[in-house]
Amino acid sequence: MDLYQAIVRRRSTRRFREEPLPDEVLDQIDEIAAHVQPLTTENRFRVMRRDVVSGEDLIAAMGGYGRVVSPPHFLIGYIIGDRAPLVDLGYRMEQIAVRLVNLGISTCFIGSLGRENDVRVRFHLNRQARTGAFLIFGYPADSVTGRTLNAVIRTAARGSNKLPASEIFHKGTFDQACTPPKELNRVIEAGCLAPSANNAQPCRLLWHDETLYLFVKRENSRYGKTVSQDYRYFDAGAYMANMTLAMEEENMLGKWELLKTSNLGIPDHPETLEALAKLRPR
């Protein structure tokens, strides 16, 4: 499949086959992780690959919630820097996830915000490292029980209930959402398929002066309280990554530019939204 098909077909997997991936496939994954596109070169990005010990409760060991059954491997991506670190981290990790799906490998993000200090200690990371989420991966369980469990978990999390582009995209002003123009539709649809914590789907788009602006909702009850609200940044990065990969498949040019609050020229928008980045596709 091509990258766009990988974006469309990707589903969060919670039950895996126990056997590890072949060494040559793991080598491919290491190569993918080493060559993802950065959102900004101001940050330092690293990825650690780890195997799961047989019988280890990975979620409990990481201090997370939910259930992941017999995953063979996981990636710990972390970033050090001050330039929108969680946005950049989500952008890079989502590229890895999609390219793994393109290899026929299933994935699942497990969030780590709220317990980053424990993660830093457990994996001997720099005190300034941001982790955001682990990426669990392996071949999916192909038994009836395994397929059923994965479907049930997706339904419970409403992970298949994605907002359509016509509810995300706005033209000129935020007065009313509308359907994107034909030349942008597939790219924006790819963004809408990006994963988000608790399926919060925080991103909104505004087409203004031949430029696409990406905003996130400042507050979202699906994230919970306090630091968990910062998942909006990681999720926005994943959204932008899907759009970048879709542009690659569509032979479109354009590069995301991170915005600062001091940026002049950010279009008028509701106070409930925060401007993160802009893109001039062509």
Image (cartoon, grey):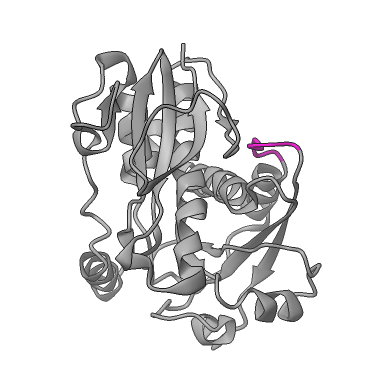
Q: Quadrant of residue 142?
A: bottom left
Q: Quadrant of residue 155?
A: bottom left
Foreground residue among 87 and 133:
87
Q: What residue appears at the point 51 percent right and 23 percent down from the top-left corner?
A: 265
Q: Is residue 273 visible?
A: yes
Q: Position of residue 46 (x, y in %)?
A: 74, 54
Q: Position of residue 52 (x, y in %)?
A: 60, 76
Q: Position of residue 123 (x, y in %)?
A: 74, 75
User: Left or right: 112 with respect to 78?
Assistant: left
User: Left or right: 32 with respect to 111?
Assistant: right
Q: Is residue 33 above or below residue 240?
A: below
User: Left or right: 250 with respect to 184?
Assistant: right
Q: Is residue 174 above or below residue 117?
A: above
Magenta residues: mostly which secondary structure? loop
Foreground residue among 156 and 52:
156
Foreground residue among 133 and 106:
133
Q: Position of residue 88 (x, y in %)?
A: 61, 45
Q: Is residue 11 above or below residue 270?
A: below
Q: What residue appears at the point 36 percent right and 35 percent down from the top-left corner?
A: 269
Name the quarter where the N terminus is drawn. top left
Q: Which residues are magenta?
A: 35-41
Task: Tell me, yes or no, whether the highlighted magenta stretch contains residue 36.
Answer: yes
Task: Tell me, yes or no, whether the highlighted magenta stretch contains residue 67.
Answer: no
